[in-house]
Amino acid sequence: MEENNINKNLEELVEFLNPLHNETSEERYQVLSNLSPTELQTQLKKLGDIAYIIGLEEQKQLQIGQLLGILSER
């Protein structure tokens, strides 16, 4: 279940970034500048939420690696 949420969040991130994929910085700016303030705020919140979830997943994987002796503690 949790993995499905992570996959869904990653898909949302890819969907958000995909229109920007092969564009120049100027074109990316145009895409973002055409969003309303509310839409931009929504996209930024989504990105923040996704970054947080990815960070939690990374922390979980690092703990698993430490428990298995794959990674040493810093």
Image: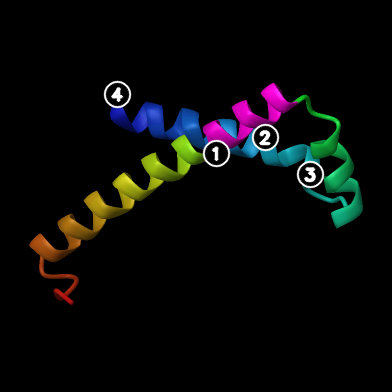
Q: Which residue in the protein does label 2 denote? A: 16
Residue 32 appears left or right of 39: right
Image coloring type: rainbow
Residue hosting label 4? 1
Numbered disc in front, either 2 or 1: 1
Q: CA distance from mark 2 to mark 4?
A: 23 Å
* Residue 11 rendering spot, x and y as whole percentages: 56, 33
Q: CA distance from mark 4 to mark 1?
A: 21 Å
**Amino acid on which disc 4 is placed:** Met
At 77% from the left and 24% from the top, the residue drawn is: 36
Label 4 residue SS:
loop
- Amino acid under label 3? Leu
Question: Which span is picked out in magenta?
Answer: 37-47
Please rate how many residues cluster around mark 1, counting C-alpha atoms within 10 Å: few if below 14, some from 14 to 19, many from 20: some
- Chief SS of the magenta region: helix
Q: Quadrant of the C terminus?
A: bottom left
> Label 1 belongs to which residue?
47
Q: Which dot marks residue 20?
A: 3
